[in-house]
Image (cartoon, grey):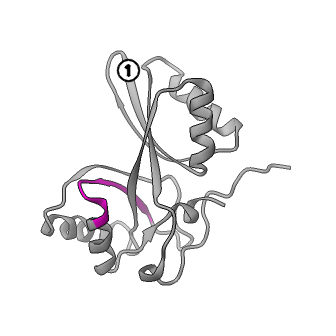
Amino acid sequence: MDKRKDPVRPMSPDPSTKKGTPIVQFSVMFENRVGSLSGIVGLLHDRMVEVLGLSLADSSDVAVARLVVSDPDLAMQVFLEKGIPHVMGGVVVVELTRGASDLGRCLKTLNQAETNIHFSYPLLVRSEARNPLLVLHLEDSDFAEKLLEQQGFPLVCQEDLSR
């Protein structure tokens, strides 16, 4: 029997009342060699931690993978046990309820508030409503969260991604 965690739980019906654990992103550094990223994802998978979001930046020698996972505590334990260099940080995950057409409205909202987006990438899962989820690393996450919620964008917390 497969005991893997179901990567997505239902979204709460009213995003303005949602409170939960902020989503953690891992920035993992490793040698830029064939199979290195696959090895890291495999280590997590073997411990029943699923990679739900991935962004990769590489150079000739090293690569940095930004990961959102189903179980951040267990992922951190794996990285520590294996001596894998990593940094943890918070990100904002927004649900685009109107699909891709909401992307422009989301970006315009942040632009009008003069909030810088340092980087962004989609999650590999969707909300239960089948809407896209977008990871945002922002200059001021607390301010951006309030602003996005005021504009009607549902925000996702770790409990929405993990069981």
**Vertical position of residue 13 compared to residue 96: above or below:** below
Look at the image and say whether residue 108 sits in the magenta stretch.
Answer: no
- What is the quadrant of the C terminus in the image? bottom right
Does residue 128 sit above or below 86 in this rendering? below
Q: Which residue shows up at 53% across the image and 57% down it? A: 125
The x and y percentages for residue 146 are: 30, 73
Identified by mark 1, the residue type is: Val
Residue at the spot of label 1 = 62
Of residues 48 and 104, which is closer to you in this image? 48
Under circle 1, the secondary element is strand
Q: Is residue 134 in the magenta section? A: yes
Residue range of the region highlighted in magenta in the rendering = 132-142
Whole-percent x, y for residue 108 in the image: 18, 68
Q: Is residue 67 left or right of residue 57?
A: right
Whether residue 50 appears in this view of the structure is: no
Badge 1 density bin: few <14, some 14–19, many ≥20, Cα 10 Å: few
Question: Which residue shows up at 46% across the image and 60% down it?
Answer: 22
Q: Which residue: 15% across, 64% down? A: 111
